[in-house]
Image: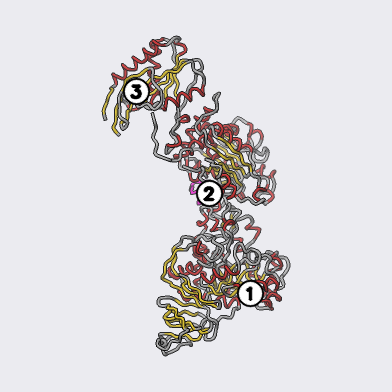
């Protein structure tokens, strides 16, 4: 079975390929990349486009004229909810949602039920993903048993079983000694510790950012310092231990500044943010809109700007989705009772492309945050369009304007504050080991 | 106007309209036949998730005086734990063809949520820390009765403003009517971003009650909830009373004809001393009486939903 | 707009009505006047002065707002403005003269009767109006009528009094 993607605008940050051309896929692997014009890549074919007359019968042609061709995207932070919360999402529906969003690799967090804090649950997830998943799934294991923050989980065994990183995400590791141990111990396995930075005492009972909106709506607020204090602590522990620290879902200006200074000092820290933090502010909650309730909460205009600045100067290495699907009944409740989270896999790319449209980032730079950077941090061996590598491709129409419709989500989670938004940049095809997916 | 969710969305004109008709309702309450047929045949549900005898009784009396049919649903918090969601409760009520829902709930934003899922008119009887609009309206009415005006008055609100829906509703209402507001309390109990949140530039904040009370025309004391002490907002009730309690000495710092108000129930000896609560400057009992009249006025103001442009018949 | 009554005619009409009221009654001490808000209030006060001059006894006067008793509240766009109900005397056992400026469908009078019944038990209630413009929708009639003025439904009758608008006159306006 051969597939030819013709005349697409190819950008492969892994191989450093940029240019218009064709990609030939054979038996699910990249056979060759043909560029129409010369560029600084080491993989090019000077003979131009293949002759149409001798095309074999089993060749499927995808016309990518006017479209962009990227390596399948990597989301290093999402929640697939299985095992235990399959009313919110399953590995099957979550990976399908990922595919629709252009992602061929999902790193799923351990706050399932039971928690992924042992090799049995890890194996369950991997087996489910192999049998039913539409794309690759890489489990992130829990740092502590039950995510209770008291005792280290069996990081080594989980790593052997397939966990590529560890996090108690959903919760912080409040006990600084345990966090220190985790960062130290993880060095044996050369994996990152992903930290959900939240001082639970300061954030207690809070449901929105502390400030104008919390006062106006009479809701308990979470001060920015709840995040900043823990980022500072974790950075210092990373400095102490030499472990690999990755800060999840940065939402504050203060947080960005701390990370920037840490990197300047050579501390081994990386960081991510999510599209909702650089697109919305606390104003989105104004009408007690539970679809905008998220943890950490949406902040203010100055934080939004600082996050964009952080993406520009590399302080923030990665954009992840923190895809957090919930059942519709759960979000149709009083604000205090509704769970936090935004279903983000299917809106991440068009929302992020706005940064390119507004001139903050180049397309190449944005793409790196979804490809080479998460691959590097998580140690996922991807090689883009290198000859012989498994074909993982997403084809995007950057010019196509469309309306976000939550009923069309393949994710079970329809909880998005972006319903009805008009965005540019639609995924048309996603190709990965399970097949070719076309989205009209 | 279909719902009364908060004073933050009420226009000055609407507030004035409600206040001006409250006097007429107060007259009805003094008659032998304390009833008017105005809302005869309309049904109201008092949906109280938080226990409250005084507010619910006040609403119930107001509704009966307007000749309404009254249903009382007192939902203890455990009912929700048993599994019926808020939405299901509302849908059940909808099937009874109710015209009004009076809702009190411990979570902010519940009246707004309900208004999106019902055809009935929704009246907020207190939602979490957000608003308690009928309390603010009866407070404003009481001030008008005692002082003749609100514009230009110096009004001090004292206590746990951070957690007080009564304070919030009063701040929006009184500032719209032209009062000069002072907020007094321990720093831990004052909300952040006050001026931006309320959109009022001349909001004065005082940590020391003596400074804040000087020359005040009206002093509104807020109830201190005992749980706050556990959470570290202040070290002890004794300390709270020592520094922020309204004593006769502190009352003398205000204008000689200043009035003292409290939404009730009072914690004597914690936020207010007994002498002041029972003293000649206290308007606390009038607040209760006015509560019924104001609630009748609110029901009256909400009862017309345009079904046709009917004009008066002579 | 057409002026159908001027200040002099209004004065003569009120004087005539006052005499009719005085002539008919038994005990002058039982008489009281209640003006319906808004149009009847000033007329009631004028009749009070005239009657006190004729009968030589004090005649109590009050004002009655009927907003709470109207039958058209659910079809109006806004709740009508509530005005003062000020009846400082007991109406039980009294001869009450209800006073309004214009009698039209009769619904306001029906509301006024219900309101009065909630306030006491008058011995009798009579109605005095300055203008009866016809088009009754209820079986209501006035015992004392200033002037019968046939009108069509698309017209409006306005009684303007010097206490409010500086001039006494009655006008008909086509809508």
Q: Is residue A136 left or right of residue C128?
A: right
Within 10 Å of the Cα at label 2, are there few (<14), some (14-19), or many (20+) other Cα atoms?
Answer: few
Secondary structure of the residue carrying tag 3 is strand
Residue A257 image-quadrant placement: bottom right
Label 1 sits on a secondary structure element that is loop
What residue does disc 3 label? C132
Q: Residues within 10 Å of mark 3 (few under 14, many from 20)?
A: many
Label 2, label 3: how many angstroms apart (C-alpha)?
Answer: 49 Å
Question: Which chain is home to disc 2?
Answer: B
Q: Nearer the viewer, mark 3 or mark 1?
A: 3
Could you tell me residue B32's position as x and y percent?
55, 23
- The residue lying furthest to the front in this view is A57
Q: Position of residue B23 (x, y in %)?
A: 50, 30
Q: Position of residue C59 (x, y in %)?
A: 44, 15
Quarter of the figure with residue C14: top left
Above or below, A179 against C77 in this view is below
Task: Respond whether the residues carrying marks 1 and 2 are from the same subunit.
Answer: no
What's the magenta bit mostly, secondary-structure-wise? Answer: loop
Q: Residue at x 66, y 36 (%)?
A: B273
Q: Is residue A11 visible?
A: yes
> Which residue is tagged 1?
A192
Range shown magenta: B196-203
Q: Considering the numbered disc 2 on the image, is that residue within a helix, a strand or a loop?
A: loop
Front residue of A96 and B261? A96
From the image, state whether disc 1 or disc 2 is nearer to you: 2
Whether residue B143 is visible, yes or no, is: no
Q: Nearer the viewer, residue A404 or A200?
A: A404
């Amino acid at each position: 079975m051969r597939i030819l993607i013709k005349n697409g605008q190819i950008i492969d940050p892994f191989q450093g390929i940029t240019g218009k051309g064709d990609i030939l896929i054979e038996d699910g692997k990249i056979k060759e990349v043909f560029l129409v014009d010369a560029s600084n890549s080491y993989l090019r074919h000077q003979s131009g486009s293949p002759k149409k007359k001798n095309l074999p019968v089993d060749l499927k042609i995808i016309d990518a004229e006017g479209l962009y061709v990227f390596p399948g995207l990597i989301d290093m932070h999402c929640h697939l909810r299985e095992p235990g919360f399959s009313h919110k999402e399953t590995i099957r529906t979550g990976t399908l949602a990922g595919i629709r969003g252009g992602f061929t690799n999902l790193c799923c967090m351990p706050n399932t039920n039971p928690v992924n804090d042992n090799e049995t649950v890890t194996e369950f997830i991997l087996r489910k993903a192999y049998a039913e998943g539409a794309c690759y799934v890489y489990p992130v294991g829990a740092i502590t048993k039950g995510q209770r923050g008291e005792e280290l989980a069996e990081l080594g065994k989980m790593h052997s079983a397939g966990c590529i990183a560890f996090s108690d995400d959903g919760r912080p590791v409040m006990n600084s000694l345990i966090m220190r141990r985790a960062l130290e111990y993880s060095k044996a396995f050369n994996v990152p510790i992903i930290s959900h930075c939240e001082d639970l005492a300061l954030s207690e009972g809070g449901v929105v950012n502390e400030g104008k909106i919390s006062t106006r709506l009479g809701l308990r607020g979470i001060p920015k310092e709840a995040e900043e204090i823990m980022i500072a602590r974790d950075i210092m522990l990373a400095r102490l231990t030499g472990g690999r620290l990755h800060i999840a879902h940065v939402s504050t200006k203060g947080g960005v500044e701390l990370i920037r200074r840490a990197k300047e000092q050579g501390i081994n820290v990386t960081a991510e943010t999510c599209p909702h933090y650089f697109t919305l502010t606390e104003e989105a909650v104004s009408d007690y809109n539970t679809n905008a309730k998220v943890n950490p909460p949406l902040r203010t205009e100055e934080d939004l700007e600082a996050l964009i600045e952080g993406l520009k100067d590399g302080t923030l290495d990665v954009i992840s989705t923190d895809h957090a699907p919930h059942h519709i009944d759960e979000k149709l409740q009083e604000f205090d009772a509704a769970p936090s989270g935004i279903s983000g896999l299917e809106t991440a790319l068009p929302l992020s492309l706005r940064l390119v449209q507004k001139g903050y980032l180049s397309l190449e730079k944005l793409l790196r945050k979804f490809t080479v950077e998460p691959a590097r941090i998580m140690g996922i061996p991807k090689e883009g369009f290198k000859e012989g590598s498994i074909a993982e491709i997403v084809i995007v129409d950057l010019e196509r304007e469309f309306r976000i419709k939550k009923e069309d989500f393949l994710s079970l989670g329809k909880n998005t504050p972006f319903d009805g938004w008009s965005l540019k940049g639609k995924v048309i095809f996603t190709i990965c080991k399970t097949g070719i997916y076309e989205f009209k | 106007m279909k719902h009364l969710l908060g004073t933050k969305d009420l226009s000055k004109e609407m507030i004035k309209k409600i206040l001006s008709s409250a006097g007429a309702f107060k007259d009805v309450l003094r008659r032998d036949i304390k009833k008017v047929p105005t809302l005869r045949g309309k049904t109201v549900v008092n949906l109280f998730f938080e226990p409250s005898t005084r507010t619910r009784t006040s609403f119930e009396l107001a509704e009966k005086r307007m000749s309404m049919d009254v249903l009382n649903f007192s939902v203890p918090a455990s009912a929700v734990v048993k599994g019926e969601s808020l939405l299901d409760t509302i849908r059940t009520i909808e099937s009874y063809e109710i015209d009004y829902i009076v809702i009190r709930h411990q979570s902010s934003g519940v009246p707004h949520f309900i208004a999106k899922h019902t055809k009935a008119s929704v009246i907020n009887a207190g939602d979490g820390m957000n608003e308690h609009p009928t309390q603010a309206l009866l407070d404003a009415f009481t001030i008008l009765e005692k002082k003749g005006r609100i514009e230009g008055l110096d009004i001090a609100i004292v206590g746990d403003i951070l957690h007080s829906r009564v304070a919030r509703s009063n701040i929006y209402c009184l500032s719209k009517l032209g009062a000069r507001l002072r907020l007094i309390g321990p720093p831990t109990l004052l909300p952040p971003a006050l001026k931006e949140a309320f959109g009022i530039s001349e909001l004065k904040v005082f940590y020391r009650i003596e400074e804040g009370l000087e020359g005040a025309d009206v002093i509104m004391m807020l109830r201190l909830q005992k749980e706050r002490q556990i959470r570290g907002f202040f070290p002890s009730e004794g300390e709270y009373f020592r520094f922020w309690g309204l004593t006769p000495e502190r009352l003398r710092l205000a204008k000689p004809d200043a009035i003292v108000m409290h939404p009730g129930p009072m914690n004597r000896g914690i936020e207010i001393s007994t002498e002041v609560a029972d003293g000649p400057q206290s308007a606390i009992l009038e607040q209760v009486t006015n509560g019924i009249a104001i609630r009748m006025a609110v029901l009256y103001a909400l009862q017309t939903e345009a079904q046709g442009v009917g004009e008066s018949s002579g | 707009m057409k002026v159908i009554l001027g200040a002099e005619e209004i004065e003569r009409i009120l004087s005539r009505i006052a005499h009719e009221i005085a002539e008919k009654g038994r005990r002058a001490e039982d008489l009281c006047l209640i003006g319906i808000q808004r149009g009847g209030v000033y007329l009631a006060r004028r009749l009070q002065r005239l009657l006190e001059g004729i009968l030589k006894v004090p005649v109590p006067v009050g004002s009655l707002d009927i907003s709470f008793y109207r039958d058209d509240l659910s079809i109006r766009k806004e709740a009508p403005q509530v005005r003062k109900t000020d009846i400082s005397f007991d109406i039980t056992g009294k001869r009450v003269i209800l006073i309004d400026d214009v009698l039209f469908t009769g619904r306001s009078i029906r509301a006024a009767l219900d309101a009065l019944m909630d306030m006491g038990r008058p011995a009798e209630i009579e109605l005095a109006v300055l203008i009866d413009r016809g088009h009754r929708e209820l079986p209501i009639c006035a015992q004392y009528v200033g002037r019968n003025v046939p009108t069509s439904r698309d017209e409006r009758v306005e009684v303007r009094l010097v206490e409010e608008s500086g001039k006494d006159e009655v006008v008909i306006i086509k809508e």
